[in-house]
Structure formats: structure tokens, C-alpha cells
């Protein structure tokens, strides 16, 4: 799983790869098209995937571990659509991360994790070959 230089940008769809940093922003590459563009810190907020965590009853779970669990259980537990109702999303997340804090993790957070996971798979950042190497 390649999550180190993957970043989400507010106001933009999808995930990007960090090329380099500047004092006033980041230069990011869109993985599908390969286009490189500057994003200003005055306009956008950046969320590196390796810093994202989901609240649990005791601590936080790294999103990388959640992605790995989602990927390893695809055969028995397919990933729901982000358009599914909140009950379906909550039941799915209970099976993926049973100890998640239901008071602090909202359906919108679950939808975001599912969107990020689907995007990571589409872009080739999550791959079965990577799991075998680890």
C-alpha cells in the first residue's frame, strides 16, 4: 500500500501525489492524468492520508490499517456505495472496525473513508501484490 505521499485537497475531488512543497503551497500531481499543478495554502487545506485516523473507544486507528482491513475482507464483505443509507454504512464500518467510536465518527466520515479507499484502489495505490510483499 502506497500511502506516504498521497494527499486530499479541499475543494478538489480525488487524491493527489505530492511532488514538492513551497512556502506558500504544494505542487501536486494528479495520478490519472499526470498533470502537475500548484495549490496555494491560502485557498486549500491539505490532508495527508498517512495522518488520518478514526476515533476508537481507546485511541485512534490509522486509515492505512482500515484500508488494509477493507481490502483483505473484500471477498466476504464488499464495500458499500457512499450513496447507501447511514444504517448500511454504520453496519459495514462495525464489521471493519468494531471498536470505532459511534459518538465521534459520523456517517460523513465513513463516506469519506469509503471514497478515499475507492480512489486509492482506482489509482493503484492499494494492490494485492503490495500486501504479499509486506
Image: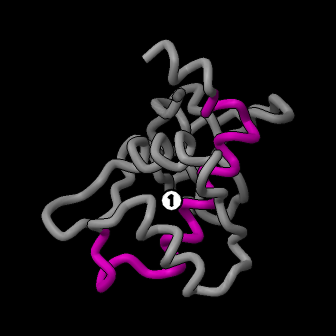
Magenta span contains residue 53: no
Question: Magenta segment range?
Answer: 100-127
Q: Is residue 55 above or below residue 103?
A: above
Magenta span contains residue 110: yes
Residue 126 x %, y %:
61, 33
Residue beneath label 1, please?
45
Residue 42 x %, y %:
52, 60
Q: Is residue 47 above or below residue 81?
A: above
Q: In this orientation, does residue 18 appear? A: yes
Quarter of the figure with residue 36: top right
| Frontmost residue, 24 versus 124 | 124
Q: Is residue 30 left or right of residue 116?
A: right
User: Regarding mark 1 in the picture, which secondary structure is present there?
Assistant: loop
Residue with the most extreme left position: 58
Q: Is residue 61 left or right of residue 36?
A: left
Q: Quadrant of the C terminus?
A: top left
The residue under the point 70% across, 31% down is 124
Q: In this orientation, does residue 21 appear? A: no
Amino acid at each position: 500500500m502506497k500511502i506516504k505521499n498521497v494527499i486530499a485537497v479541499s475543494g478538489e475531488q480525488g487524491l493527489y501525489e505530492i511532488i514538492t512543497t513551497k512556502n506558500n503551497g504544494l505542487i501536486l500531481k494528479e495520478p490519472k492524468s499526470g498533470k502537475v499543478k500548484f495549490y496555494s495554502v491560502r485557498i486549500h487545506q491539505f490532508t495527508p492520508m498517512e495522518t488520518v485516523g478514526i476515533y476508537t473507544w481507546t485511541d485512534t486507528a490509522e486509515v492505512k490499517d482500515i484500508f488494509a482491513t477493507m481490502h483483505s475482507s473484500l471477498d466476504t464483505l464488499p464495500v458499500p456505495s457512499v450513496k447507501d443509507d447511514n444504517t448500511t454504512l454504520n453496519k459495514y464500518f462495525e464489521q471493519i472496525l468494531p471498536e470505532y467510536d459511534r459518538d465521534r465518527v459520523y456517517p460523513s466520515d465513513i463516506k469519506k473513508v469509503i471514497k478515499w479507499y475507492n480512489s486509492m484502489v482506482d489509482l493503484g495505490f492499494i494492490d494485492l501484490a503490495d500486501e504479499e510483499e509486506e
